[in-house]
Amino acid sequence: MKQVTRVFWKIFFIGFAVFALLILSINLGLFGKLPSLSELENPSILQATEVYAADGTLMGKYFLNRGNRSNVDYRDISKHAVNALIATEDERFYDHSGIDGRSVLRAIVFLGKEGGGSTITQQLALNMFAERSKNPIKRVVQKLKEWIIAIKLERNFTKEEILTLYLNTVPFGENVYGIRNAALTFFQKEPDRLAPEEAAVLIGLLKGNTLYNPRRNPKAAVNRRNVVLDQMAKNGYLTEEQGAKLKLKPIALNYRKQDETAGLAPYFREVLRDDIKKWCKETTNPATGDPYDIYKDGLRIYTTINPRMQIYAEEAVAKHMPTLQKAMNAQPSIKKGKVWEGHNNVLESAMKASDRWKNGREEGLTDTELRKIFKTKTPMKVFAWNSRRETDTIMTPMDSIKYHRQMLQTSFMVMDPVTGEVKAWVGGIDFKTYKFDHVNINTKRQVGSSIKPFLYCQALEEAGFTPETQVENVAQDFPGFGLVPAKGICKGNTVSMATALTYSYNCATAYIMKQIGPKRFVEFLHNINIKSKMDAYPSICLGAVDLSMYEMLYGYTMFANNGYSTQPTYITRIEDRNGNVLESFQTKMNQVISEAAAYTTTKMLGGPVEVGTAAGLRARLGAAEMAGKTGTTNDNADAWFIGFTPQLLGGTWVGCDDRFIRIENNLGYGGQASRPIWEYFFQKVYADKTLGIDKDARFAQPEQMKNEVMYDYMNIIDQTQPPGAEGEDQGNGAADQYLMEPENNDVPIESEIPKDEEDVLKEARDSEKKKEKKPTDTAEPPKKKGIFRKIFGGKKNKEQE
C-alpha cells in the first residue's frame, strides 16, 4: 500500500512539475508569442472605420470580413445584456480571477457534456488573440495560453472592462461582431436600449449563431432565448413571474443587414473611402510604426454631411427620376431598340465585362456557348423604381444589359458656398446596382450653358462690360475655327448682356467670347480653380467641354461668396479608435474676382430663375433672392441646373452613361430634366426650420457699390421668352467640330480692335438697328415688367408707380 502511495505521489509531483514547466514555457513564448502587457492594455482587435455625419450620426463603416466591429463603452450597454451574458456564460464571473476551478473540473469529469470550462475572460482571450485550433494537442496548449492571458487580463482590467471588451469582440453571426452591430442588425436599436427579451435573443446567439439565428431559425431562437431568460431568473436578474411573461412573447425582429452599402450617402462614402485610403497610406500609426489601415484600426471619420439634407436630396432624386425615366422609355427609339443601332461594340464590351461571362469562362465555356446563354431568357432581378429598387423578371442577359444601360443617371451635390462644407451628395440613382459616382472630380460630362456665367463674369471683370452692355446675337466667325455656334438659328439682333444670360443665347455668348478670347477664358477658368485640361476652342463658351459637378460647384462658389473661391470640403477631422484627433481639415479659400463682379453676376443670374430658362423658380419657392443657370448639351445628352441662395449652392445633372442614349424632347433640357430635383430639395429644406435656411436671406451688396447709382434694369430684358439654347435646343457644338487652335487666339476686346475692323462692326450694328421697327429715334421703348428692379434693386419711375 505504501508502495502504491509513493508511486502515486511520485507521478503527481512529476506531473505537476511537467505542468508547471509547460506553463512557464508557454509564458516565455516557447510555444508562440504571448501578448505583452501594453498589448493587453491596447488590444489589437480588428475594428471597422466609422463615418459620421456633421451631427454625429453614424453614416456607415469600412470593414473586412472580421472587421465589422464598433466599440461601445460599458455605460452604453444595456444591463440586461450584461446580466444575460453572466447568467448564461459565467455565473461566478465576479468571484473568480480568470479561471473557474469548478467549471474546469465539471468539464473534465463530464467531458464537456454539461457545459464548457471557459470563463468569459478566457473566451475573451481566445477572441482577442487566437483562432480556435482543431488539433487536439494544439488545442490543449491553446487552452493553457488562454488561462495565462485570462489571468493577465484580470490583473490589468476591471470586471466591467472585461465585459465590455468581450461584448465588443464576440461574433453574432452574419459577419456581425460586437453587441452594437448585433443590436443594430437584429433590432435597429443602440445596445443601451435593448429590452430583457431582446438581450436574451442576442446572448443566445453566442451558443450557436447559425443554429439560433432568429431570422433563419425562429423556433430554435425562441427556445434558446427562453433558456437564457430562465438563467436570468435563476440568478436573480429577473423574477420568475417576469421570466414567464417574457417567454410568452414572440421575437419582435427588426432586421436590417449592416453592410457597407447601408446607411446615408453610399456614393459619398465610396468616394470618401478612396480619400481615407490615401490618407492612411501617407500617415504612420505611432503605435505600430506602420501606415494606418482603414479596415483594422477603427478610425473615426467626421464629415460635413447634413443627414436631413442628405435624405431630402435622395428623396428629390427618387421623386423626379422615375417620371423622367418613364417618359424616356416611351420613346420609339427605346421601345423598339433602335437606340442600339450602330452601337453593338458597347453591348459587346458590357457583355464580356459581366460576371456571367467571366464565370462562364472559368467553367470552360466557349464564346459560342456563352453568346447563346446571353440570348436565352432566364429569371433574374433587375433595378426598378419601386420601394425595393428591384423587381423579379424573366429576360435574356443581353436584354438586361440594354435595360440597365438605358436608365437615366443623375448627380446632385449641395454645399455651403461660404464655408465650403458639402451638405449632401447623391452620385447616382441606386448604389446597390450602379456603383459609378457622377459627382466626384474625376467624373466629367459636357456642361452646356451652365458654363456661361463664368464667361459673363470675366467680361464684367476684365473687359469693362456691364449688364446693360449691348451684345450681338449673331453667329461669330473665329479665324481658324469657323462660325460659332456651328449650327442653330441666331435671332440676328442686339440684346443686353443680362438678357443674353437670362435666355442663354448661344450667339450672344459667342460674341462675348470673341471679345475675351478662348485662351484668356481658359486661363480664367483655371484661375477660379476649375483645373481640368481644356483646349482653347471657342465652343468652350457654349459648354463643349467635359467638367465634373465638383469642379462646377467649386467655380460657382465665388458668386455667392463675394469673389472668394471656396473648395468643397467634406472631412472635418479624423480620430483614432480612442478619440484622439489625428488630423483636422480646414477650408481652402482664395479671392479670384472682385466683390463687385461677383455681386453683379449673381444679380444677373437672377434672370434665369425669374423669367428665363428656369422661369418662376424663385417665386415658386418663395425666396427673397435666388440665382441659377440651366445647361443643355447637344441632343439633350446632358442636362444641368446649378443654383444658389445666400446660404446654399446646389448642382444637379441628368443623363445616361452612354451619351447616345438621351431624352428626345424638351424634357431633356436642363430646366426640365435637372431643375425639378433642385427645386424639390429646396422645398423640403425651406420647410424644415431646424436647418436654419432662411427664405428671406439676401445676397450681401459690397460696400463700394452701396454709394453707386443702381440702374433700373426693367427695360433691359425682353420678357417674352424667345427660342434659345434652353428653349429650342441649339446644341453647344463640340471641340472637334472646329479647326485646330490658331497660334494666337487672344482676340482683342472691342476697344482694341483696329480701325478697319471697328468700322465693320459699326456698320453691322447700324444695319441691325435699321431692321428694328421704331417710329422715331426718340420713341419710348415698350414698357415691360420690372424684373431687373427685383434683381438689382432699382427704383420705379413715376409712370410705373
Image (cartoon, helix red, strand yellow):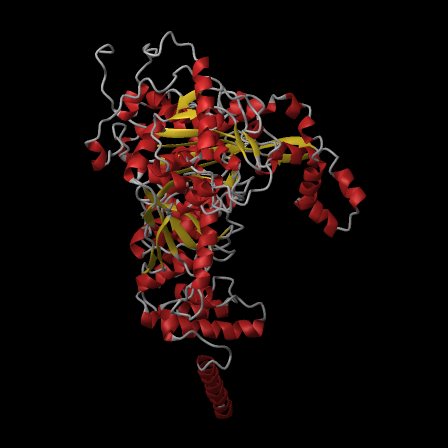
> Looking at the picture, does residue 103 appear above or below residue 691?
below
Q: Can residue 46 be seen from the camera position used here?
A: no
Seen from the viewer's position, the closer of residues 757 and 566 is 757
Furthest-left residue in this view: 707
Seen from the viewer's position, the closer of residues 354 and 365 is 354
> Looking at the picture, does residue 614 appear above or below residue 415?
above
> Looking at the picture, does residue 177 appear above or below residue 659?
below
Seen from the viewer's position, the closer of residues 292 and 395 is 292
Q: Can residue 51 be seen from the camera position used here?
A: yes
The residue that appears at 41% across and 45% down in the rendered structure is: 184
Seen from the viewer's position, the closer of residues 431 and 272 is 272
> Looking at the picture, does residue 456 appear above or below residue 180?
above
Q: Would you say 297 lies left or right of 666 here?
A: left
Total tally of numbered discs in the picture: 0
The residue that appears at 36% across and 52% down in the rendered structure is: 81
Quadrant position of residue 177: bottom left
- Where is residue 91 shown, x and y percent of the image? 37, 60
Furthest-top residue in this view: 775
Quadrant position of residue 780: top left
- Where is residue 693 shown, x and y percent of the image? 28, 33
Q: Would you say 165 lies left or right of 11 here?
A: left
Q: Which quarter of the figure is the C terminus placed in?
A: top left
- Where is residue 601 shown, x and y percent of the image? 34, 32
Quadrant position of residue 452: top left
- Where is residue 123 shown, x and y percent of the image? 44, 64
The residue that appears at 47% across and 46% down in the rendered structure is: 441
Furthest-front residue in this view: 755
